[in-house]
Amino acid sequence: MKKLLPLVLSLILVFTLCACSQRVYELPWDHFCYSASDGHPIILEPSEKNYIIKLLNEGDWYNDIAKCYTDVKFAAKSQSLGYCIEDGVFNDFTLHKSLKLSEQDRLTINGYLGF
């Protein structure tokens, strides 16, 4: 019994650390943001990119794609995302889910994108 308790506590610690460090969205090596209409890259500052990645990783995602027009495309490291400017919604086409932003976050992101 004395050996079992440290083993169980060690496993709990390992699983907790793995869960906390897991990031779904990461910046790609090249361009991150494109116009959906013509594919032209949209240049963002590193702080703006990090803000978007933080929203994507910390947001409450829904298990379905929202029905809205994709104005901007994002290329995370392993995912393809679309962003609807009017609705403030990110659609993850790779994982088939969507994220609705708060009004403040929508205005911030739209400002970054020049809309």
Image: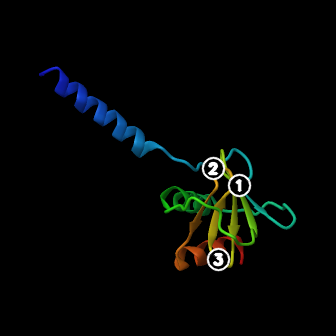
Q: Which amino acid does label 2 sit on?
A: Leu
Mark 1 residue element: loop
**Crowd around label 3: few <14 · some 14–19 · many ≥20 (10 Å):** some
The residue at the far right in this view is 38
Tell me which label, 3 or 1, sits earlier in the chain: 1
Model colouring? rainbow
**x, y percent for residue 4:** 19, 23
Question: In 3D space, how far apart are the residues under numbered discs 3 and 1 (Cα atoms)?
Answer: 21 Å
Query: At which x and y percent is residue 46?
Result: 62, 58
Which dot marks residue 65? none
Amino acid carrying label 3: it is: Asp
Q: Do the residues labelled 3 and 2 touch (CB within 8 Å)?
A: no
Left or right: where 59 falls relative to 89: left
Q: Is residue 60 left or right of residue 78?
A: left
Disc 3 marks which residue?
87
Residue 56 in which image quadrant: bottom right
- Going by the numbered disc 1, the residue's amino acid type is Phe
Pick whichever, 20 or 49, lies toward us. Answer: 20
Pointer 2: what residue? 27
Q: Quadrant of the C terminus?
A: bottom right
Q: How crowded is mark 2: few (under 14 residues within 10 Å), some or many (20 or more)?
A: some
Badge 1 is on which residue?
Answer: 32
| Residue 1 rendering spot, x and y as whole percentages | 12, 22
